[in-house]
Amino acid sequence: MTVVVAAHTPTPEGEAALEHAVGEAQLRAARLVVVSRGPRLHEQDHAGTDVAALERRLQDAGIEFAVHRPTGDYDYAEEVLEATRDNAAVLVVIGIRHRTPVGKLLMASAAQRVLLDAPCPVTAVKVPGAVG
């Protein structure tokens, strides 16, 4: 089966990526694998609440899906790349935001790593109406 991977974070950029990925999965009759940025070790109490809402949202979209939510100390970009490789995904959808040149220099982003290292095409989605 065709697989689309979505990098989801609880941000406007992550929501835009998820919305676009759902549309791509519907268009391609594909399974959607969502790598949702999960809680860190100190945030375990909140691990289940957002996942249930996310799963309901995906069920309502009428697509086949799986949600992977890493916990503990993890490298988010590597989790997305691993899901892409493990599922032989045909597309990865990520959310991006504008960064200043200094911000780009000081902090390498997970989005940049996924763009450069993914073994398939990557769609980078901005929040509708975002400047930059």
Image (tube, rainbow, N blue to C red):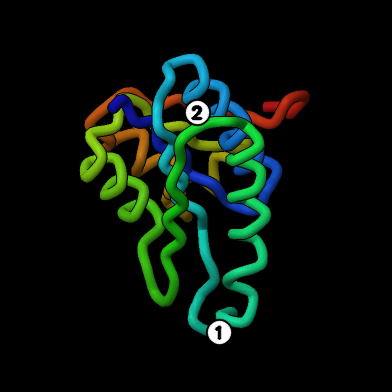
Horizontal side of residue 116 vs 66, given as left or right: left
Identify the disc placed on residue 77: none
Circle 2 Cα neighbour tier, 10 Å, few/some/many (<14 / 14–19 / ≥20): some
Residue at the image point whose x is 34% and y is 55% from the top: 79
Q: Position of residue 70 (x, y in %)?
A: 42, 65
Tag 2, which secondary structure? Answer: strand
Q: Nearer the viewer, residue 6 or 103?
A: 6
Tag 1, which secondary structure? Answer: helix
Horizontal side of residue 127 vs 26, given as left or right: right
Q: Nearer the viewer, residue 15 or 50?
A: 50
Q: CA distance from mark 2 to mark 1?
A: 30 Å
Q: Position of residue 131 (x, y in %)?
A: 73, 27
* Residue under label 2: 124
Can the viewer see residue 13 in this picture? Answer: no
- Which circle's residue, 2 or 1, is located before the other in the chain? 1
Q: Position of residue 34 (x, y in %)?
A: 46, 45
**Quarter location, residue 86:** top left
Residue at the image point whose x is 48% and y is 44% from the top: 7
**42 lies above or below 102:** below
Q: Position of residue 74 (x, y in %)?
A: 37, 68
Residue at the image point whose x is 49% and y is 36% from the top: 94
In which quadrant will I find the N terminus?
top left
Identify the disc placed on residue 42: 1
Q: Residue furthest top?
A: 27
